[in-house]
Structure formats: structure tokens, C-alpha cells
């Protein structure tokens, strides 16, 4: 679920159609087949560019595509940046709608992935403008179980990475809000991408200590979701229903609104 805003890519140039002989018609059929193949290849390349070389199927819903829609700033409103994985993609549009007329809500142009990706990309994401509030999370991709049965980012590495990311975010001067990582269902054995439900509190505890040390506000989405998980989360899936994303979005919007400058 990666690069955000779809763009138009020019198709390969097609020659004018001249009058052809029978032999030329045979060649034209081959050329036409080749051209159609090139067009398809160009379309696939365009999709790969949009999604940062990840398959389009990773971002299948219209709601998620809408999360990456261009935002036209209202100059008089504060600017807000959402940083997160596919969970944040799901609540981006609800947050925008709930804060309409109160803030210009942007998100990073890709899935934030693990903290290792954040270390590489955060500087680029932050260059998109001056931010009044930054609401951020890393976690679900860090605790993902790899083929060798280890976590993608160990708890020790997660702590070091997250400390570095928080330090970089603090340099923006924005008000920071950390979102706790949302629950992995207890039916974790059935997940397509392997994760362990018991790992989430471990990573959240590490993050909580870092945020408290740095006086960063905490938006406890884990605590919000856990008691109602069976009602708002998809079966055997870390993602949420449309109603579930609205539940998360309402909490995120409320936390952000509380951090916005008060009107005099």
C-alpha cells in the first residue's frame, strides 16, 4: 500500500496508420500485438510507481485510494500530517471529514511500514510543508513475523528506531500525538501475514515509555479498539470494517482537534 496519488502516464507513441499491402498487414498484426503488450506493461509500471513497487492488490478499496487524494489547503487553517500504515489509511478520510473547516489533513504518500522505513523516508515526508500537528504510528509492520520466525524489527531495534524518529519529529516544532498500535486478533494463527496478538502490548509498552519521556501525547487506539474488537475488526484480519475505521477516525480527529491552536 504504498505511493499515494495516482497520475496519468502517457501511452507509447503510436504511428499513423498508412495504407498496407497484404504482407504489411501480417506484420501489422504482430506489431499491434506487441504494441498492446507494451501498453499493458506501461500500465503495470505506472501502477508499480504509484504503489512503490508493491502490487496494486495491497490497496484494494476505494476508501484507501481516497486517503491519497490531493488536499487543497485552506490557507487560514492549520496543517495536520498523519503518519502510519494501512490502519491509518483506513481512518484518513473519516478524520478529514470530521476536521473539515478546522484543519487541512494530509497523510504521507505511502504506507509507513516498519520503523526501518521511517528512518529512510521521514525526512522526505516532512519536507511537504510546515505542520501544526503530527499524528503518527509505527508497529504492526515491525512485529510482523518473518519466514525465519523472527520479528521484522526486534523490540530492541524498535526502541532505538522509534527514539530516533521521535527526535526527528520533535525538530519540526509540531505538536506530536502518538497512536498506539491497534490489536492483532486472537485468531492470529489464521492471519495471512503472520503476527502474534501478544506482541502488540510489548511494542506498545516500549512506545509508551518513549512518548512519556519525551512528553508526547498518546492516542490509545489499542485501548479503544480492544473491548469492541469483534464488532469493528474484520475476521482473522488486522484491518477494520468501514464502521470500525469511523470509530478510530472519531478518536483520532478528537485528539488532533484538542491539539490545534485555540481560536481567539
Image: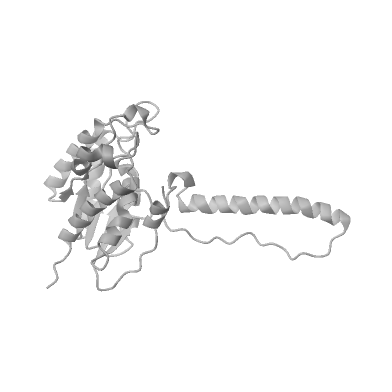
Q: How many marks can you see?
A: 0
Where the C terminus falls, by quadrant?
bottom left
> Which residue occupies the foreground of this view, 32 or 188?
188
Residue at the far right: name it: 22
Left of 80 or right of it: where is 217?
left
Q: Residue at x 37, y 48 (%)?
A: 111
Left of 218 or right of it: where is 246?
right
Residue 11 in the image: state x and y as whole percent. 61, 60
When asked about the image quadrant of residue 66, the answer is bottom left
> Which residue occupies the foreground of this view, 86 or 128?
86
| Colour pattern of the rendering | one colour
Residue 54 in the image: state x and y as whole percent. 46, 45
Q: Residue at x 39, y 63 (%)?
A: 70
When asked about the image quadrant of residue 162, the answer is top left
Q: Residue at x 66, y 62 (%)?
A: 13
Residue 241 in the image: state x and y as whole percent. 33, 45
Residue 210 in the image: state x and y as whole percent. 16, 43
Judge whether residue 119 can be spotted in this image.
Answer: no
Amino acid at each position: 500500500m504504498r505511493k499515494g496519488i495516482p497520475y496519468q502516464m502517457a501511452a507509447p507513441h503510436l504511428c499513423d496508420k498508412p495504407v498496407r499491402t497484404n504482407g504489411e498487414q501480417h506484420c501489422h498484426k504482430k506489431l499491434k500485438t506487441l504494441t498492446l503488450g507494451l501498453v499493458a506493461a506501461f500500465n503495470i509500471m505506472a501502477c508499480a510507481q504509484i504503489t512503490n513497487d508493491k502490487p496494486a492488490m495491497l490497496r484494494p478499496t476505494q476508501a484507501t485510494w481516497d486517503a491519497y487524494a490531493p488536499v487543497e489547503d485552506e490557507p487560514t487553517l492549520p496543517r495536520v500530517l498523519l503518519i502510519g500504515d494501512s490502519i491509518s489509511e483506513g481512518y484518513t478520510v473519516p478524520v478529514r471529514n470530521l476536521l473539515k473547516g478546522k484543519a487541512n489533513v494530509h497523510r504521507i504518500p505511502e504506507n509507513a511500514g516498519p520503523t526501518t522505513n521511517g528512518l529512510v523516508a521521514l525526512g522526505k515526508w516532512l519536507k511537504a510543508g510546515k505542520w501544526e500537528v503530527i499524528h503518527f504510528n509505527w508497529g504492526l509492520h515491525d512485529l510482523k513475523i518473518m519466514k525465519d520466525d523472527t520479528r521484522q524489527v526486534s523490540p530492541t531495534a524498535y526502541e532505538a528506531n522509534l527514539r530516533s524518529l521521535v527526535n526527528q519529529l520533535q525538530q519540526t516544532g509540531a505538536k506530536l500525538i502518538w497512536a498506539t498500535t491497534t490489536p492483532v486478533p486472537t485468531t492470529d494463527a489464521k492471519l495471512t501475514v503472520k503476527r502474534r496478538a501478544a506482541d502488540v502490548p510489548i511494542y506498545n509498552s516500549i512506545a509508551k515509555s518513549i512518548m512519556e519521556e519525551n512528553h508526547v501525547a498518546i492516542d490509545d487506539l489499542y485501548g479503544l479498539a480492544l473491548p469492541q474488537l469483534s464488532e469493528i475488526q474484520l475476521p482473522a484480519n488486522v484491518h477494520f470494517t468501514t464502521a470500525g475505521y469511523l470509530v478510530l477516525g472519531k478518536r483520532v480527529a478528537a485528539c488532533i482537534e484538542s491539539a490545534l491552536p485555540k481560536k481567539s
